[in-house]
Amino acid sequence: MIRIGHGYDVHKLVEDRKLIIGGVEIPHDMGLLGHSDADVLTHAVMDALLGALALGDIGKHFPDNDPEYSGADSIMLLKRVFTIINEKGWKINNIDATVIAQKPKLASYIEQMRRNIANACNCDISQISVKATTEEKLGFTGQLLGISAHAVALLSDDK
């Protein structure tokens, strides 16, 4: 049996925050606002994995009103999500994700993002795709108000 999940996340760009995407700290004059480290890519990946098994979303598992998750490292949370799906007898076939950001340019960080996600999910980097695009200065991402990400995950059972 196979299951497909989709994840989407968005965070507002603000001053005086680190910009962390896919577990990579990226030099930039703004960062993403959130209860955790606001890693928009990793959040979308977690929601795709949870969604594939109809297990809710990251807000259900890691509520933003719980002080335990204040400033949390999203890659560590992804490891916990992987443990959940693994314990239920599912494995990751592949994850395909896209980050939408006008700035900064992300191309030089993509391979490390892929490695971080693959390591957290105990899978090969060939199973993880990360892409980045702009919206040609349109919408909230194009106007530098925030960054968003989409992810899809294909899971199969271990049987």
Image: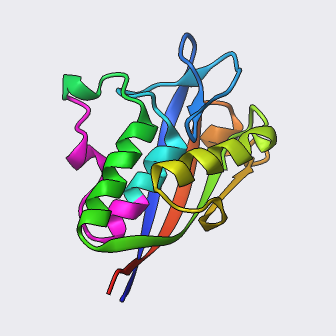
Q: Nearer the viewer, residue 98 or 12?
A: 98
- Placement of the C terminus among the 4 image quadrants: bottom left
Q: Is residue 61 left or right of residue 146?
A: left
Q: Is residue 68 magenta?
A: no
- Image quadrant for the N terminus? bottom left
Estimate the x, y position of residue 71 in percent, counting from the top left: 37, 22
Residue 116: image location, x then y, percent: 57, 44
The magenta-colored residue range is 48-65
Q: Is residue 62 magenta?
A: yes
Would you place residue 83 above or below residue 75 in this image?
A: below
Q: Residue at x 34, y 73 (%)?
A: 90
From the viewer's perspective, is 2 left or right of 93? left
> Which percent across, then down, holds residue 37?
44, 27
What residue occupies the far top of the structure in this picture? 16
In this picture, residue 138 sits left or right of residue 31: right
- The spot of residue 58 in percent (x, y) is 31, 48
